[in-house]
Image: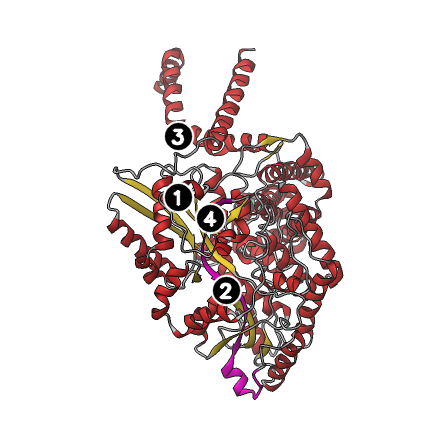
Amino acid sequence: MRFVKSRRVAWTTLLAVTLGAALAACGGGGSDAGQELSKEPVTLRFTWWGSDARHKRTQQVIELFQKKYPNITVKGEFKEWNGYWDSLATTVAANDAPDIIQMDELYIASYAERGALLDLGTAKKHLETNDFDPAALQTGQIDGKQYAIPVGLSSYSMVVNEDLLKEYGVAMPDDNTWTWQDLKAAGAQVSKASGGKVTGVQSWGFNDAGGLNIWARQAGASLYDDKGNVSIPPSVLANYWTYLADLAKEGIAPPPSVTIERASAGLDQSGTATNTSAFATWWNTQLTSLTAASGKKLKLLKLPGEAQAKSPGAYYKPSMYWSVSSRSKHPAEAALFVNYLANSEEAANVLLTDRGVPANKKIRTAIAGQLKETDKAAAGYLDAIKVGPAPRVTPKGASGIEAILKRHTEQVLFGRLTPDAAAASFIKELQSEIDAAK
Amino acid sequence: MSALGEMRRLGSSAQKGKKDNKAAFFFLLPWFAGLLFITVGPVAASLVLGFTEYNLIQPPEFNGVDNFTRMLDDTRLHHALGVTFKYVAVSVPLQLACALGLALLLDKGLRGLAFYRSAFYLPSLLGSSVAIAVLWRQIFGAEGLINQVLAFAGIQGRGWISDPDTALSTLIVLNVWTFGAPMIIFLAGLRQIPEMYYEAAATDGAGRWTQFWRITLPLLSPIIFFNLVLQIIHAFQSFTQAFVVSGGTGGPSDSTLFYTLYLYQRGFNNFDMGYASALAWLLLVIIAAFTAINFWAAKHWVFYDD
């Protein structure tokens, strides 16, 4: 009897301890972001994803900031894209989120609507936003609250390898008028002239939802409606996959398994970087990295189909955002640091366009003189294209869209699903993720 | 005589015995603490979370058995179960067969046995590591070692890992390759079989095959059973290899979506920790069921000498 009793006591205690710990993790809450800056030593944690080059530049900016505010120490935590989101989710759950968080459009609603991000409107005292384009600022707002400050702008583009076109005697298409059929035709010429050594087009649809957004917008539709439900018509989606599947079937794009292998290997292994594909879709700001990797002359073209589109497919996408954890113990200092990142010329001179062409207009002009040829081309591209209003931010629950898109694209390319079946399945799955998060 | 006296003295002083117990518990304390906070605590928490909706950011909310009814309609879960069953059903028997075969060879008293034993055991130590999974990706890639060897023979290879028809097979090969641990256990088991059985059988004119079939296998059956149970449990829990080889996606086109990988995706990519916790408990039930079936079936084929 004694044994039974004590065992029960042990189990209850255990459960209580565990639940207590879990609840403690969920509680908490930061102090006021509008208060005066502390004179005491303060340590902030700042997390971002990116390449080695970005880590070096960011570390430099941190050192400049610390020189200016000697009582504030900023500890950088950086990761690559995939690991970044896994670790952010766990640290937020453990009530151990970094104070300053580099945020992406895919996840902003998922975090903000669940109360993980600070409303930066409460930190106006330390954080200026006057030099930002209102339309750009708006992309960081949810329900009228400014949860994030856009860092840089980028837009989807078609990167073409001029040297390859010359080598195979293919004429440069006129990107003011070209259609998706023109892209196919030019790509086919390259594939044929090279004897298969170089494919005309690098398949896309893997790494981000940008291409799908553009495709939907050109058809006069959108991926999500205003309420955040999936609204892309199945036929538009099916056309998208039919086009991709045809590219692979006709040898204009590499075979599916090569495409999949490259997609998971990153930018340096891509067809553009290795000079094995003449045309490929990329964000315009990736031109510098791509050129460095390929060593050839690359050029940004406007997207095909824009001249015939029902509405412009192109739009300005914030390449990323700065946000502050709602549970930061030092929200005022964190806002001050974001202010430094977003508004200081000193910082901008180091960061340049690594995170996109700055969304802060004053900064954009200030650094214009220091840009490399490719960075200038990327900045110029933004001015050259005609854009429509930015699509709605990715709804809460839909942050996994890229994984879902990737899987369905694979199934279409390997012939396991028809484009029509894939379209129905994709819409159903994405919508159910959104519903589950409501 | 003196030893007996010592024992008597020990037995008579119960006081001292209790003291010894206390000391033992004290020294075990770090282990108990680890067990409580790192294993038992989270396990209990996951059971509770299995009945909640928990998005990692907001506090969990109880939702009854919703998570479990949801499993019935979850087609990706059903697919993940299929992939996992296929993996277990193919890789475990192959792995054990390799382990047994090698153990029989090494048991013949090869020169430099210690070296071979270590060499064959090495993959077991490395097999579930990230480094090996990365290496695997290179070996089976479109321009990897396998295809280069095939190219020598004039055979056109393919992207083994990026093709949904072959991706799972590469993971099965990886698991089979880590046959070292069961092999060592088989070797120990083979050493236990008395040499005289074989001598007697040889005198009676039994060939090698008959000896293997009539002596080795029956006497080794408890060891086979032990390895089988262990490796099935192990295979059900495989995660690292698929995670690294597919870049965390379970692709291409979900062909390597192990159960644990799907669970991980639900929890950490989809902020669906309540459901993921429920999935963890389903896996526990599945493994327990398979182990129970194994023990039941063992009655019919495992032979205990004593």
To the question of a shared chain for discs 4 and 1, the answer is yes
Q: Real-space Cα distance between discs 3 and 1?
A: 50 Å
Badge 2 local density, few (<14 within 10 Å), some, or many (20+)?
Answer: few
The boundaries of the magenta stretch are: A145-172
* Residue A188: quadrant of the picture: bottom right
Q: Real-space Cα distance between discs 2 and 4?
A: 27 Å
- Residue drawn at (60%, 64%), measured in percent from left and top? A211
Query: Which part of the image, by quadrant, shows the C terminus of chain B?
Result: top right
Cβ–Cβ below 8 Å for labels 4 and 1? Answer: no
Residue A212, horizontal then vertical, whole percent: 63, 62
To the question of a shared chain for discs 3 and 1, the answer is no
Given the image, on which type of amino acid does mark 3 rest?
Pro
A332 sits left or right of A180 in the view = left
Q: Is residue A166 above or below residue A217?
A: below
Q: The numbered mark 1 sits on a residue in which chain?
A: A
Name the front one of labels 4 and 1.
1
Visible in this render: residue B245?
yes
Q: Is B167 covered by the magenta stretch?
A: no
- For label 4, the residue is A148
Query: Which part of the image, by quadrant, shows the N terminus of chain B?
Result: top left
Q: Is residue A199 above or below residue A321?
A: below
Q: Real-space Cα distance between discs 2 and 3?
A: 44 Å
Residue A78, horizontal then vertical, whole percent: 40, 52
Given the image, on which type of amino acid does mark 1 rest?
Lys
Cβ–Cβ below 8 Å for labels 3 and 4? Answer: no
Q: Real-space Cα distance between discs 1 and 2?
A: 39 Å
- For label 1, the residue is A124
- Residue drawn at (36%, 42%), measured in percent from left and top? A125
